Amino acid sequence: MITYEEAFRRVMLYTKDFGTVSVPLMESVNCVLAETIYADRDFPPFNRSTKDGIALQHSAFETNEQVFKIEGIIGAGLAQQKLENPKSCLEIMTGAVVPAYADTIVMYEDIEIKDGYATVHTEPVKGQNIHLQGSDKKEGTVLLEKGIRISPAEIGILASVGKASVVVQKTPTVCVISTGDELVPVSEIPKPHQIRTSNVLSLKAALQKENITATHLHLNDNKEVIQAAVLKALTEYDVLLLSGGVSKGKFDFIPEVMDELGVEKVFHKVLQRPGKPFWFGVHEEYNAMVFSFPGNPVSTFSNYCVYFAPWLKNSMGLGVRDRFVVLKNDVEKHPILTLYIPAVLEWDGATLLAKTVANNGSGDLTSLAEIDGFVCLPPGEANYEKGAQVHFIPSK
Ligand SMILES: Nc1nc2c(c(=O)[nH]1)N[C@H]1C(S)=C(S)[C@@H](COP(=O)(O)OP(=O)(O)OC[C@H]3O[C@@H](n4cnc5c(N)ncnc54)[C@H](O)[C@@H]3O)O[C@H]1N2
Ligand code: MOO
């Protein structure tokens, strides 16, 4: 059996680039940007007023001018006007183009308007309240680099440079497969000896957050049925995520089916809890990858978070960085297994604390309620004490 570190290293060796695709702007949220985005014009594209008030020529104040004839009103969206007479001003709204020859904006709060004249009560500074053309970014400047995740802030930037469609990193096509005669669909009332399928729906939900709409296939514990369905899935999808059927039971057909179908085993079983019987392999000819997770719900979910999520991140070009948190309570180590313990995070001042959640073993699906992830605890003799800094694997 291999260690968690070795299993992780081997999974990461199979990081893969799935190419790029152009998608409509609003479908790119949460995708990884695969093109460099440049400013198509200056930002802002013209000298814009940052206040509602009047636009004037500052030189007028040098000749002690304080009262200005109002020549008109400029709203945002109007083409640039001119202010040729230094004894005049134009009312101007926030976002409007500063008129030619004007160089200063005085806001309404600092003036008084009467009978078509504005009296200025302050001593304005030349250039005040003007957001100068190109002062944020010049035309041609890089606004967004390739390889970042597109969040709502990036959508605004993409929209402002006219990207109605965006080139993003393609995600793999995924088929999630549940196995087991005991499983019934969510909408059914299980008989006393049955349970509702839940693992693969958690997997589908996790994938949905990554913009992957996975296909779900349920297979009963029949070797021929499993073999035929897995073969078809291998030819049709980039990745197969399975749950169940990988341990020692009489109906645990997955490892032998994979072998018979020519899926090369990279490893089976990891020195970890939960999720020890995790099986991982690749099919060279079909260019498919198989993550076969143990069926216990906590095992399926923790393995997804520990291995698949970082593999996907790496494949998307995002890179994976280790995160650390501080234990809020003592935790027992295991002498030979790496433990993943469900945990809830909370801030204590500037410190991020992880409070572990007690569970009833890896079949205890209910222990996953509200968790933020898992603390990852390497094996050893001495226990982890409250205050220890530990590796954290997020699940949200
Ligand atoms: N003799 C041994 N027995 C077991 C070993 C072992 O090493 N030797 N390992 C144990 C460990 S650890 C785990 S984890 C489980 C994994 O077993 P399988 O991957 O074969 O999973 P199943 O037996 O099919 O199911 C286990 C458990 O999970 C439930 N399950 C399965 N799929 C779903 C689903 N989609 N939604 C909800 N629940 C699901 C299933 O009903 C079982 O209760 O093996 C141990 N045994
Ligand atoms: O490894 Mo299993 O997931 O402990 O129950």
Image (cartoon, rainbow, N blue to C red):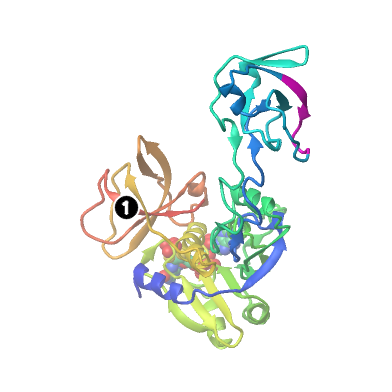
Q: Who's the residue at 26% across and 50% down the image?
A: 384
Say whether residue 103 is visible: yes
- The number of discs equals 1
Q: Who's the residue at 63% across and 23% down the image?
A: 107
Q: Residue furthest left?
A: 382
Q: Which residues are magenta?
A: 69-78
Local secondary structure at mark 1 = strand
- Amino acid type at circle 1 is Val
Relative height, residue 156 to residue 72 (above, below): below
x and y percentages locating residue 204 in the rendered image: 62, 60
Query: Which quadrant of the render holds ligand 2?
Result: bottom left
Q: Who's the residue at 71% across and 55% down the image?
A: 162
Q: Is residue 153 magenta?
A: no
> Can you tell which quarter of the image residue 205 is in?
bottom right
Q: Which residue is mark 1?
A: 390
x and y percentages locating residue 113 in the rendered image: 71, 14
Q: Is residue 277 left or right of residue 348?
A: right
Q: Is residue 375 left or right of residue 246?
A: left
How packed mark 1 is, by other alpha carbons closer than 10 Å (few <14, some 14-19, many 20 or more), is some
